């Protein structure tokens, strides 16, 4: 096989079909970028789960002066109740660690958390904040078991699961991911049709050449390879653009915008990004290669 | 070299068969004219030999091979052993004379050194020396057909198929092409030529197979054109 011949044929084909080629590249780029973004969102969710599930706790708030839940009935928790609760929590097999946060501790944490809004801190006294047990579970998904066991105990105001708050956020991200993947799938479908159409037009516009090639006994491979490579090349260029978009997403949106402004959580790292990029190239190549291959089988017979 | 046994061909779109129970045997080195009125099945005959079409009945043997049993991927090899010339030349308009002939070798993967050796040889054989770098539209019809013959013959095929090669040429130019085909035939190449050109057939005095409505109605060793004779 003469490589120079194949290369010059590809060049001719791509130039002859420039507008179609551009359309293919753009569509492939968009579909793969969305696909990559979808994968990264999933990676982000799992990064955040790892990060947060390690830290989330169940808070068992105890009754204070102002607690008006039916369980407290306006009376603060007694020392016996507190000791009993602590012992029982520690004795629960699901529980890994329990520590006590007094009103003073809570106030200190509050001051730290809202140090940017001194007005708010000024209006709060340690007495206004509830004391609580911070419970770390061996398995964060087992929250309900612990909650139901302690919710109605005397002296308990409320049992709150930090994980529940996170779950809502994760649900949002998952929806986002689903959307990205659905649009990616639709786009990939469109890209396939477009590639197939481009190859068909290319095959038609070069039917004179391919007709002569067939007559003089060129092999199928020789006749089809330039078209196939043309399709794959367009797919790869599309994948390159998509990769650029994904890298920009990580460098600008995550590293420059989100990280400094929302440092409370972990974000996907470059390793995850670099794991996604080869996948984009592979998908782009397989997508355009298969679309070209099946089109050629139908339109460039020996 | 070419043997058709009771071959029939009915195109999917039509009711009447284009070829109807045709049996013809052509030996190595023969020169055969295929004559008959328009639509009698001459081109269909030639397409079957190239395996561009498959017969709906009967068997086609070319160079000892049963084409029905020839697998799909061996068809290119068959076609490399058959050169083709057509009425409309079928040259690539954006390639020079040299490149047009070289194209036939490039696409079957011949090395560049081989191409630069044999293309000038064959161009000289067909009488186009010195016109290597002309574009097809800078050539007369006869010269264009010579390029097509050069391309068909450059790979030294065992068989040369010509479908009305003089159909677009004036009588004098046609004689030139016929002399060329005759010369190629004398190198041992089997030539099968479909034609409407009575003068040529009459002057060459070669074997004539006449088709009418898809049937062989005449097969003469040193025949003349003469319809229905
Ligand atoms: N691709 C095709 N599909 C359907 N019918 C066809 C096809 N090609 C040829 N035919 C029919 O088959 C018959 C024989 O056609 P063929 O081309 O072999 O004739 P021919 O002898 O070469 O005619 P001509 O001298 O005009 O070239 C004709 O009736 C034609 O209409
Ligand atoms: Mg014909």
Image (cartoon, coloured by chain):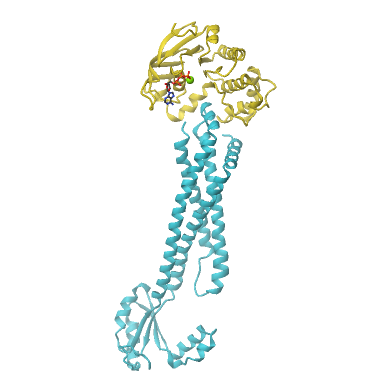
Chain colours: A cyan, B yellow
Residue A298 drawn above or below residue A121: above
At 45% from the left and 16% from the top, the residue drawn is B2
Residue B74 in sight here? yes
Q: Is residue B219 left or right of residue B150?
A: left
Quarter of image, ligand 1: top left
In depth, the one of A146 and A223 nearer the eye is: A223
Residue B122 falls in image quadrant: top right
Residue A139 in sight here? no
Residue A226 falls in image quadrant: top right
State the image coordinates of residue B172 (x, y, percent, origin top left).
62, 12
In depth, the one of A12 and A261 nearer the eye is: A12
Residue A144 falls in image quadrant: bottom left
Q: Is residue A139 left or right of residue B49?
A: left
Residue A276 drawn above or below residue B199: below
State the image coordinates of residue B153 (x, y, percent, origin top left).
57, 20
At 39% from the left and 23% from the top, the residue drawn is B55
């Amino acid at each position: 096989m003469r490589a120079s011949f194949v290369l010059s044929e590809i060049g001719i084909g791509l130039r002859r079909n420039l507008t179609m080629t551009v359309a293919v590249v753009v569509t492939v780029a968009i579909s793969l970028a969305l696909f990559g973004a979808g994968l990264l969102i999933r990676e982000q969710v799992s990064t955040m789960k790892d990060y947060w599930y390690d830290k989330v706790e169940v808070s068992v708030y105890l009754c204070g002066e102002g607690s008006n839940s039916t369980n407290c009935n306006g009376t603060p928790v007694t020392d016996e109740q507190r000791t009993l609760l602590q012992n029982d929590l520690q004795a629960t097999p699901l529980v890994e660690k329990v520590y006590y946060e007094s009103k003073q501790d809570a106030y200190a944490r509050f001051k730290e958390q809202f140090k940017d809004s001194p007005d708010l801190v000024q209006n709060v006294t340690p007495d206004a904040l509830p004391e609580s047990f911070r419970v770390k579970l061996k398995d964060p998904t087992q929250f309900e078991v612990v909650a139901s066991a302690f919710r109605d105990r005397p002296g308990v105001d409320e049992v709150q699961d930090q994980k529940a708050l996170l779950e809502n956020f994760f649900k949002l991200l998952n929806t986002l991911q689903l959307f990205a993947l659905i649009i990616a799938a639709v786009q990939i479908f469109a890209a396939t049709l477009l590639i197939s159409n481009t190859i068909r037009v290319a095959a038609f516009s070069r039917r004179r050449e391919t007709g002569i090639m067939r007559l003089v006994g060129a092999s199928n491979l020789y006749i089809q390879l330039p078209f196939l490579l043309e399709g794959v090349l367009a797919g790869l260029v599309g994948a390159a653009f998509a990769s650029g978009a994904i890298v920009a997403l990580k460098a600008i949106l995550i590293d420059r915008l989100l990280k400094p402004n929302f440092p409370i959580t972990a974000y996907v790292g470059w390793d995850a990004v670099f794991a996604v990029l080869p996948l984009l190239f592979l998908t782009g190549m397989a997508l355009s290669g298969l679309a070209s291959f099946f089109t050629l089988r139908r339109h460039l017979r020996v | 070299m070419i043997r058709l046994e009771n071959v029939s061909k009915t195109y999917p779109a039509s009711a009447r068969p284009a070829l109807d129970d045709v049996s013809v045997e052509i030996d190595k080195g023969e020169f055969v004219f295929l004559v008959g009125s328009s639509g009698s099945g001459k081109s269909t005959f030639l397409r079957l030999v190239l395996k561009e079409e498959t017969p709906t009945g009967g068997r086609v043997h070319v160079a000892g091979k049963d084409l029905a049993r020839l697998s799909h991927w061996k068809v290119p090899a068959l076609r490399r052993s058959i050169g083709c010339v057509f009425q409309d030349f079928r040259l690539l308009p954006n390639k020079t004379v040299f490149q047009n002939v070289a194209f036939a070798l490039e696409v079957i993967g011949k090395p560049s050194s081989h191409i630069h050796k044999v293309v000038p040889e064959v161009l000289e054989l067909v009488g186009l020396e010195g016109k290597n770098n002309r574009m097809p539209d800078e050539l007369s019809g006869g010269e264009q057909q010579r390029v097509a013959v050069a391309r068909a013959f450059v790979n030294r095929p065992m068989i040369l198929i010509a479908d009305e090669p003089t159909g677009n040429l004036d009588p004098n130019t046609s004689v030139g092409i016929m002399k060329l085909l005759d010369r190629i035939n004398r190198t041992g190449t089997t030539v099968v030529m479909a034609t409407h050109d009575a003068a040529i057939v009459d002057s060459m005095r070669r074997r004539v197979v006449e088709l009418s409505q898809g049937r062989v109605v005449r097969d003469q060793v040193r025949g003349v054109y003469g319809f229905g004779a």
